[in-house]
Image: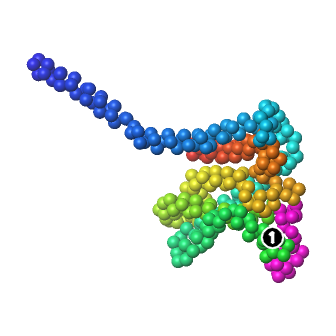
Amino acid sequence: MTLLTAQAPTRDTERPTRTRRRKGATRVPPMVLAFVFLPLLAEAFWVFWPALQGFYLSLTKWDGVSAPQFVGLGNYREMFGDPVFGSAVLHTVLWLVLFGGLSALLGLGAALLLQQERRGVGFYRAALFLPVVFSLVATALVWQAMYQPDGLINHVLDGIGLQSLTRSWLADEQTALYAVILPALWRQIGYVMVLYLAGLKGIDPALYEAAKVDGASRVQQFRHITLPQLSSVNAVVLSVIVIDSLRSFDVMWALTRGGPYHSSELLSTYMYSTAFQSLRLGYGSALAVAIFVLAFGVIASYLVRAFREADS
C-alpha cells in the first residue's frame, strides 16, 4: 500500500508535462504559416479575384468607359447565335486535336529516341528545346517571312518541281489555320520532350530487363511498361497542352489575326478582338468564361478517367 501511494503522485505530475509536450509539438511555426498564406493571398489577389470579376463582367454590357449594365445571361444567349463564335469553337477544337495530339506524339517520340545517354545526344536535346526559349512573337515573324509568296517555303517547292503547291499560305482560307500550327508545334515539341524525358528517367530499368527475359518485344515493353509508368506524366502533359492550346494567341495573332475572313479564328483571338478592338468587354468576358469551361471540362474528364483506372 505504501508503494502504490508513493507512485501515484509521480504519474499525476508527469501527465501535464506530456500534455504540454504534445501541444508544443503540434504548434506550427509562424514562418511556415507565412510561407503558406502569403502565396495564397497573392494567388487570391492576382488570380481568383480577377476571375470572379471576369465572370461578373460576362453578365454585363460594358464598353470599358461607362458603367456596366447588368444583362444577365444575355451575352451567353448571343454567343450561341453568333456564327463567328461557332467557327471559333470548331477551329479551337481542331487546334486542340492537331496541335495537342501532334505535340504529345512527337514529343514522346523525341524523348524515346533521345533518352539513351550516348555521344552527341545532348546537342540534339538542346536543339529541340531551343525554340522554347524564343519569344512566340519573334518565332511568328520568322515563319511569316518563310510563308510569304516569295519566301523560303515557296522557293523550296519551286526547286523540287512542286510549283502547283505554291500559294500565299497565310492569306489562303484553306491553309491559314494549318500554316500557323507548324510554328506552334516547332516551339512546343521540345517542351513536351523534356517532360517525357523526366518521366522516362524515373522508370526502373529492372522492369525492362525482366520483360526481355520473358521474351517481350519492344512494342510490348512500350505498351505494358512505358505507357503505364508514364501515366502521371501524361496527366501533366495533357494539362499543359490543353492550357497552351486554349490560350494560343501570340503566334496566331502575329501571323493571321484570325483571318482571312475568320478562317483561322480561335476563341482566344476572338475574345481579344471583341474585348479590346470592338470594346465589348462584357461579351469578351463571356468568351473568356467559355474558354475556361472548355479547358476545365477536358482536363477534369481526363483526370476522372485516370483516377478510375488507377483505382480499378
Left or right placement of residue 6 versus residue 161 in this view:
left
Res 47 visible: yes
Farthest top residue in view: 1
Region rendered in magenta: 154-176
Which quarter of the figure is the N terminus placed in? Answer: top left
Mark 1 neighbour density, 10 Å: few (under 14) some (14–19) many (20 or more):
many
Secondary structure, mark 1, is helix
Q: x and y percent of residue 163 in the render?
A: 88, 77
Farthest left residue in view: 2
Against 290, residue 259 (above or below) is: below
Left or right placement of residue 100 versus residue 195 in this view:
right
Q: Residue at x 72, y 35 (%)?
A: 56
Foreground residue among 124 and 32: 32
Q: What residue type is disc 1 on?
A: Tyr
Foreground residue among 156 and 217: 156
Res 185 visible: no
Disc 1: which residue: 147
Against 143, residue 39 (above or below) is: above
